[in-house]
Amino acid sequence: MSLATVSTLQSAGPLLIVVPDAAPDGAAVLFVADVSAARILAFELPPEGPTTAIEVRVDRLGAKLASLLGVEHDDVLIRGMATHPVSHSVYLSVARGRGRQAGAVVVRVGADSGLSIVELDELPATSFELDDAPAPDDERQDALLDGSDEASQPFEIRGVTLDVARVPLARSTVTDLAWIGGELVVAGMSNEEFSSRLRRVRYPFDGTAEATSVEIFHVDHGRYETESPIRALTSFDGGTGILATYTCTPVVHFSLDELHGEGLVRGRTVAELGPMNQPFSIVPYDRDGEEFLLVSNTRHPLLKIPAASIAGQSHLDVAMADPGASLGVPRENLDHPGVTWMAGLDREHVVVVQDEDGDVNLRTLSADVL
Amino acid sequence: MEALRLGSELVPTAGSWQHTADIACFTPRFSPVGGTAYAVITRGDAGESWRELARVDVPRAAATRATVVRSIDPGGEEVPANLLRFSVSFSAEMGEGSASGHVHLRDSSGADVPGALFSMTPEFWDRERRRLTILLEPGRIKRGLRPNLLAGPPLVEGSTVTLVVDPEVRDSSGTELTEGAHRTYRVGPALRTRVDPARWDVRWPNPGNEQLVVRFDRPLDRALVRRCLSLVDECGHPVAGRSTLDRDASVWTFAPASRLSNWRLQIDTRLEDLAGNSVRRVFDRDLQRAGGDDRVDASSIVLNPDGRVERR
């Protein structure tokens, strides 16, 4: 993991915009997960003025993105979304095209709902590499005897020449980014081991900014302890905690205090969201002076969870098969179908990407309908 | 072209216009994508409707299908009922996004096993974009979770399943495969114990046979074997050599490039079997069972030729 020279964004992934304390003039920083390159890019955005607009709305967003990017509709895929905390503009990371022609683009949706390309290569940027580089002293080789692998090279061993390739390294991917307790928190998966690792990364990336990786376990229903990759996460309880949703449906609470140094941390499972489902985004908001969390899902409806119930929710410690088994904190299904990506506009408005009528629309949901 | 249907909300394609005399030249911000149709439109003023001046079709590049599935792992004939993942290796660099919906798990009647495979967003490719990892739905494998209780595990001991890769998966040039591929497995009992290197049969190199041969206690994950096993010298540096792994990933052979020395076998404890059980821990630990929380906290285990097992 190291500071690296930034080049063009290779693949679109989750986005996050923050105004870090250390940033000059309170300028916002756009973090982009360059998923296939396994790195986080940080771009310093030019100042954007405050707005009084509280609603961002773009009908037929998919068709408009396709037109802007000069591709057909099915060659556009939204891969992440973030809101600017000052201007309330919305940033979308978008995969454009397929195969070798594929590119990654960040599109800005202004308060006037106008779409524009964010020229990332013109912005000051730094990057943080997630994967370990190959160890310089690692001379292991793998045999690929037919020599068909482009990476293979002739290798002589006791008079016999073989085509061999280097031992491959695992590739991380990023599932979500959050700004918690003044640090960038990166959740991801590996293409190899099925592990749960949360990285805390200091910003600005300065070459000495060591990432702390913590393994995350959770106990389900008092019986089975497992680890699995975190899908989405958010700051909780004023930045003292993390609420994480997993690939295998639980919602788990961690105290930030526990996440220090290398090692193992066990989280408290506070809810299970149900079968055949993956969470998409988790976003906090306020309604009538009370804090709630919204969870969007691949299969289940948009869910609303009262934040106060999380502090009082003990471990789910009754086996699911037993009478009286709990699904954890109370949750309410909301009638906003098709919601995928979400980002808070302010504490009372959430911007969502919503699949409707064969296209995707950008909508702002205010707390009174949530 | 689809954008024309946006009518008054039309969004122009990003790029720049240069006007010289009676010529207007458009330079697109992004290179055109094959298979896309563009329209050049104009209008007198903002109140008028658009008038189409020309259409530009960018043809899809003619490509010959050449990419094939090279292998499907696990490579054996039987998989545990709590199998965690398949991996499919292709002969060329692949594109992203086309695998979803074109990799299936089918039962012996040829019907899809519903909800068995984990939704592939994002798709899990290796760095060379040649190997695709496909997870079975972890919520159904893990005991005690609602998907497991409501829908049951995706694989049932005693049954037969087939992983099918359709030819519609596209390579990095956007071209489909020469042909699809499939591999059929018998489903055996679930595996719920740690991978235990102390139980491996290790034959150290000797003057008569200068290869290290390791027979594991069960088939392991092929990709993780390649990464997690190494022969190291006294200082812990990996020794150069050539490794091979047999078809079902249960026998690993390493031919060192130099003569036998004071070497030992180092195992990264992240090494997993086909069910996701690692050297460190069982995939889902039953804490109510005696020894259920059995876990190795060391980051590596070292096997010595004299039989000593060290945890580091």
Image (cartoon, rainbow, N blue to C red):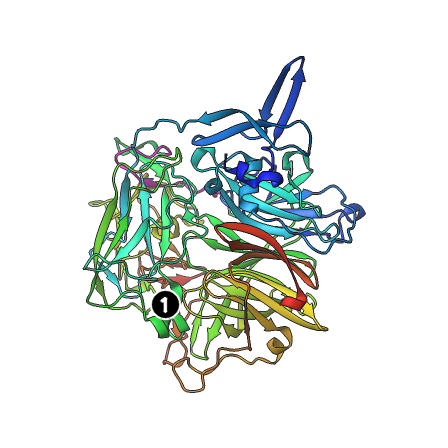
Q: Residue shown at 70%/43% (left/top)? A: A44
Judged left or right of residue A17, residue B180 is: left
| Residue at the limit of the structure toward the right, as seen here | A25
Q: Is residue B34 above or below residue A255?
A: above
Instruction: Give the dominant element type of the magenta stretch: helix, strand or loop.
Output: loop
Res A14 visible: no
Q: Is B296 situated left or right of B31 in this image? A: left
Q: Image height check: is A302 above or below B17?
A: below
- Image-quadrant location for residue A161: top left
Residue A98, placed above or below residue A173: above
In the image, B188 versus A164, the foreground residue is B188
The residue labelled by disc 1 is: B140
- Residue A137 inside the magenta-drawn segment: yes
Image quarter of residue B275: bottom left
User: Residue placed at 19% from the left, 59% from the top?
Assistant: B109
Q: Chain of mark 1?
A: B
Q: How far across and how far down the image is residue B236, in percent?
A: 44, 50
Residue interval drawn in magenta: A133-151
Query: Where residue A68 appears, x then y in whole percent?
Result: 58, 36
Let me know if residue B227 is in the magenta part. no
Q: Nearer the viewer, residue B260 or A33?
A: A33
Dot 1 surroundings within 10 Å: few (below 14), some, or many (20 or more)?
many
Specify the amino acid type for callout 1. Answer: Arg
Q: Give the percent coordinates (x, y) of residue B130.
A: 37, 41
Residue A95 position in % (x across, y down) = 51, 42
> Relative to B98, is A234 on the left or the right?
right
Element type where label 1 sits in the image? helix
Q: Residue at x 63, y 73 (%)?
A: A307
| A236 relative to B300 in the view: left or right | right
